[in-house]
Image (cartoon, rainbow, N blue to C red):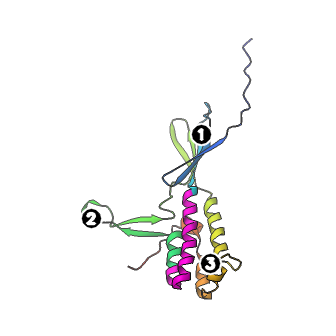
Amino acid sequence: NPPIIVASNKNFEEKSIEYLGYQFKFNDSINQKRPRNVNVAIATKKIKKTKTRIILSIKSFAKNHDEQLLLDRIKFISGNYLVRRKGNEKTQRSRFVKSGIFYNYNLCGTYKGKDHTPPEFSPPELNELKNLDKFYQTVIGKNSNFKSITSSISSTAIKQLKKISFKKGYEKRMLTNFKE
């Protein structure tokens, strides 16, 4: 009779590392029969930094009362834009580089490994951007801790601010133009 092998019931912990603005999540052990799945999302530090930028934009508005500047700042951090390249334009394919919420984090998603083939890619669920949208809507909302500041924003500007979404900026790759 062959020996009986008892499988271990070990629960694998999900590990996470942050690198270059991304958070990589995966199981802590390699299963010899199947490759690991890796979930790539926007790093927690980057989400915190974006929340800080939202708050600083609101606080800046309290000092200068410039609604257009507030709108531009929020559009900038929630959307995508073109940046002009500098240097020898003959050696470059384009005069512009795309940047912003999608283009900075376009590798987000789930990568499912397969034996000796490139991994399958599944689009991201964007939970961190959904939560960022909730945070943003709370900051500009009626019951905000910043109500003393946001109450001085015109109703027209508030309507424009409420339309802004980090998730939509990512999904629709919306480009915003800023005048120099």
Quarter placement of the N terminus: top right
State which mark lies toward you, 1 or 3: 3
Q: Are marks 1 and 3 in contact (CB under 8 Å)?
A: no
Q: Which residue is mark 2?
A: 89
What's the amino acid at mark 1?
A: Arg
- Where disc 3 sits, the SS reads helix
Q: Toward the viewer: 111 or 8?
A: 8
Alpha carbon separation for disc pair 3 and 2: 39 Å
Label 1 Cα crowd, 10 Å radius (few <14 / some 14-19 / many 20+): some
Q: Which residue is mark 1?
A: 36
Quarter placement of the C terminus: bottom left
Q: Position of residue 101 (x, y in %)?
A: 51, 64
**Measured along the vertical axis of the image, is residue 157 above or below residue 133?**
below
Q: Position of residue 78 (x, y in %)?
A: 54, 69
What's the amino acid at mark 2?
A: Glu
**Measured along the vertical axis of the image, is residue 18 above or below residue 161?**
above
- Where disc 1 sits, the SS reads loop
Alpha carbon separation for disc pair 2 and 1: 42 Å
Q: Residue at x 47, y 61 (%)?
A: 103
Q: Which residue is mark 3?
A: 162
Q: Toward the viewer: 84 or 121?
A: 84
**Magenta run includes residue 79:** no
- Tell me if I can see residue 171 in this picture: no
